Each structure stands twice: as C-alpha cells, then as structure tokens.
Image (spheres, helix red, strand yellow):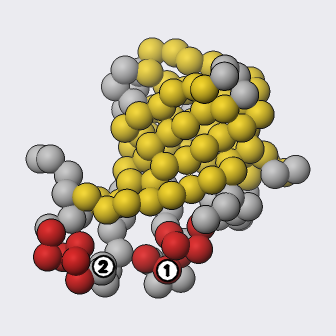
Amino acid sequence: MSLEDSGQWWATGAAYTRGLLEVFKGHEPSLKGACYTRFFFDLFPYAAYADIDLGEFPEEPHPRWVREGYDTINVGMRFVECRDVVITGGGDSHVEIRPIGNGRVAVVLEGAMATIRMTAELRVLNHRAYKKEQ
C-alpha cells in the first residue's frame, strides 16, 4: 500500500522533533529506505510504540557518533488514539507515515514478519544513533 504525498513532513505536529531536526541540520529526514525494528501496543488500541531505523544518516554527525562508528538513526515513536488497525502477513521493508488532518496520520509499517496499517495521532519522537550489526 502506498500513501499519496500530502506535502507535509511525516513528523509534523509530533513532540520533540527539534532534536531530530538539529541532528540533520534543519533537513527533514525522509522515511525512504526506513524499516521498523519493533512495534507493540500498550492498552490496545489506545497507544502503540514503534522503533524505526531511518534510511539516511546525517552528513555531519556528532563527533562522538563518528568516533563510535555509529551509522544508523533509530526513531522511537508513540502513537495514541489508534484506529482502523489491520495486521497482516509480512512483505518487503517499508515505512510510510502521512499526515491526514486533525492531528492524525496514516501509518504503514511493512516488514518480514508483519504489515501493520492504522490511523493514529503521532505524539512523541525520540532518537538515538547506533552502529547497525551487519
């Protein structure tokens, strides 16, 4: 399933996006090449959490990240008011989040084990850098 481009950044309206934008020097990182590494519900269907590895890394990463050999940015996301939840068999790695209005986003998380589709409010982002196991 492909979501049409709404013209808005996928993280528009989420809390704590400033740190992610600072890491990328104001560039809004895309979800092209991203994959989800973890997904779970808390108080289904009220809240869901997803860890997403971005497909891009900052051109000028923090010196400590260079020293440690970090090559991946993982973004933790908290969704609330989850609706229209559908979980099916897996597919190719693919992540799409598209603002659909009223503070809500349409979400598609595809991976080898499962595909998750839902609408929700993307409330909180946090990020960390790490070295991906090859």
Quarter of the image for the N terminus: give it: top right
Against 71, residue 27 (above or below) is below
Tell which residue pokes out farthest to the front in this image. Answer: 43
Q: Is residue 37 left or right of residue 48?
A: left
> What residue does disc 1 label?
22
Query: Looking at the image, which is closer to me, 132 or 55?
Result: 132
Which SS class for mark 1? helix
Instruction: Tell me the CA gap for discs 2 and 1.
Output: 10 Å
Give the percent coordinates (x, y) of residue 39: 48, 31
Q: Nearer the viewer, residue 122 or 10?
A: 122
**Image-based side of 30 in relation to 133, left or right:** right
Which of the 4 image quarters holds residue 13? Answer: bottom right
User: Is residue 98 shown to the viewer in this render?
Assistant: no
Q: Give neighbour class at mark 1: few <14, some 14-19, many 20+ (Cα, 10 Å).
A: few
SS state under label 2:
loop
> Which one is earlier in the sequence, the residue at label 2 or at label 1?
1
Amino acid type, mark 1: Glu
Q: Residue at 35% across / 75% down in the picture?
A: 58
Q: Is residue 44 above or below residue 123?
A: above
Asked if residue 125 can be seen in this view, the reply is: yes
At a point 52% along the width and 73% down the height, the residue shown is: 19
Image location (x, y in percent) of residue 131: 19, 57
On the image, the x and y values in percent for residue 71 come to 23, 63
Crowding near the residue tagged with mark 2, few <14, some 14–19, many ≥20 C-alpha atoms within 10 Å? some
Residue at horizontal 53%, vertical 82%? 26
Identify the residue under disc 2.
Answer: 61
* Amino acid type, callout 2: Pro
Q: Quadrant of residue 3?
A: top right
Give the residue at x 71% y 38%: 80
Give the percent coordinates (x, y) of residue 119: 72, 35
